Image (cartoon, rainbow, N blue to C red):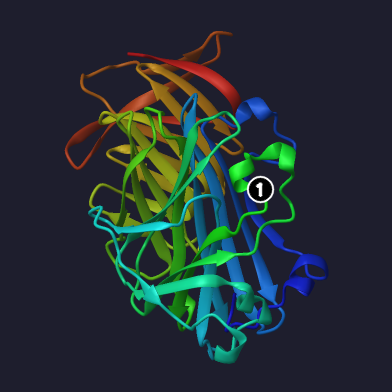
């Protein structure tokens, strides 16, 4: 919501989104999805001539767990931004806010979020409005019953920025909910809603959320979310470090300029979106949703024919590869070898070579575009 005047009618009808990138592609088989989906869309908000872009993605962390990624940038083209607001509707009990250390964040009653304050008339329907100025990272937790008689929790982990306020309100009940689809305790009940207000533009200070929905009895869910910057600390980059309960750690890379080279102490990234995943410190997968380079801890994907999408999953000496363009795969090696090979069950083999990078021995393979290829490393 830009400056309290964004108009839902044209946003829902007259003005299409631009699809910049997606994974998997439209014609891909569902079996190619693996742990990841990803889309990058942009939109011109007509009431303010605002340029908005949104990355939404899913990350599967086990057969029964996963989370959503939401990175939303927004700014007026004329630079006259007053405020940008991000809304997240939930269900059930009142929202509980906590900081990065788990301490509860207290709020106070407010008369903001109303047409008298220059907002949309629709904001007048918010009730029980409470607010707090908070510039740090925080978590908004929703809790509700499910039709399976389990307690469902939704944690919205959000990155903090300067000049930011957090509101909790009750919004009117949703007309989209049918009595047969929800427990009686949720039917026609007000919706606890998070409103995050960014004073000024939200392009260099975007709304960055990790959204984790799980049953209270589930063993695997998101345990910790932290954030990291590139060496040059450029404002177009967002880095997210997500730790799940099964020891999986995902390093998520995003940039609003897919050609900008981002460097880090343990790698680099050039692209729109990528993830390097480790389980108990061991490489699990490299996913480049769109871009040319993704490198972390001596594992590297380097596209040799321009921007594309590559997924490399690792399990010991076995690899599963999806790539829509040729690429170089580089990995660390612990012992000297003269004839490294990646071989498939159908007899196709790809020869690699031993190289040194900063005195470290590495294996480098040049691989073609591949679809769900099963490869085994032979040394």
Q: Is residue 340 above or below residue 299?
A: above
Quarter holding the N terminus is bottom right
Percent coordinates x, y for residue 259 in the rendering = 49, 61
Task: Identify the residue at horizontal 53%, vertical 42% (top origin).
Answer: 58
Taking depth in this image into account, of 125 and 121 the one nearest to the observer is 125
**Total residue callouts:** 1
The answer to whether residue 5 is above or below residue 326 is below
Image location (x, y in percent) of residue 145: 53, 39
On the image, the x and y values in percent for residue 195 come to 50, 68
Question: Which element is circle 1 on?
Answer: loop
**Vertical placement of residue 194 versus 264, above or below:** below
Q: In this view, does 375 lie to the left or right of 317?
A: right
In the image, farthest residue toward the left: 359
Nearest the eye: 240 or 322: 240
What residue sits 54% from the left and 80% below the top?
Answer: 113
Specify whether 312 is left or right of 127.
left
Q: Residue at x 62, y 28 (%)?
A: 32
Circle 1 sits on which residue? 187
**Image quadrant of residue 179?**
top right
Q: Quadrant of residue 43?
A: bottom right
* In the image: residue 45, left or right of residue 289: right
Q: Position of residue 370 (x, y in %)?
A: 59, 28
* Residue 306, visible in the rendered structure: no
Of 89 and 6, nearer the camera is 89
């Amino acid at each position: 919501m830009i400056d309290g005047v964004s108009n839902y009618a044209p946003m829902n009808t007259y003005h299409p989104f631009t699809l910049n990138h997606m994974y998997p592609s439209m014609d891909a088989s569902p079996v190619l999805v693996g742990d990841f989906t990803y889309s990058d869309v942009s939109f011109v908000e007509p009431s303010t001539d605002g340029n908005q872009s949104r990355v939404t993605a899913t990350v599967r962390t086990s057969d029964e767990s996963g989370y959503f990624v939401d990175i939303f940038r927004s700014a007026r083209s004329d630079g006259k931004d007053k405020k940008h607001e991000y809304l997240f509707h939930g269900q059930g009990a009142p929202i509980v806010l906590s900081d990065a250390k788990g301490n509860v964040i207290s709020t106070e009653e407010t008369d903001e979020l109303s047409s008298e304050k220059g907002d949309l008339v629709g904001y007048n329907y918010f009730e029980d409005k409470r607010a707090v100025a908070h510039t740090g990272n925080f978590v908004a937790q929703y809790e509700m019953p499910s039709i399976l008689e389990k307690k469902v929790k939704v944690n919205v982990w959000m990155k903090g920025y300067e000049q930011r306020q957090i509101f909790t309100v009750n919004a009117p009940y949703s007309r989209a909910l049918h009595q047969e689809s929800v427990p009686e305790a949720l039917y026609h009940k007000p919706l606890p809603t998070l409103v995050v207000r960014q004073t000024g533009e939200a392009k260099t200070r975007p709304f960055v959320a990790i959204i984790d929905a799980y049953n209270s009895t589930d063993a695997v869910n998101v345990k910790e979310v932290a954030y990291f910057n590139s060496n040059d600390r450029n404002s177009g980059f967002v880095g997210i470090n997500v730790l799940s309960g099964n020891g999986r750690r995902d390093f998520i890379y995003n940039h609003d300029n897919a050609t900008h080279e981002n460097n880090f102490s343990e790698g680099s990234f050039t692209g729109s979106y990528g993830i390097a995943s480790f389980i108990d410190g061991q490489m699990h997968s490299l996913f480049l949703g769109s871009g040319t380079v993704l490198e972390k801890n001596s594992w590297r994907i380097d596209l040799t024919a321009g921007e594309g999408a590559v997924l490399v999953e690792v399990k010991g000496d076995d690899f599963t590869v999806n790539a829509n363009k040729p690429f170089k795969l580089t990995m660390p090696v612990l012992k000297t070898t003269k004839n490294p090979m990646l071989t498939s069950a159908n007899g196709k083999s790809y020869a690699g070579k031993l190289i040194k990078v900063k005195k470290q021995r590495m294996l480098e393979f040049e691989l073609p575009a591949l679809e769900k290829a099963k490869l085994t490393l032979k040394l």
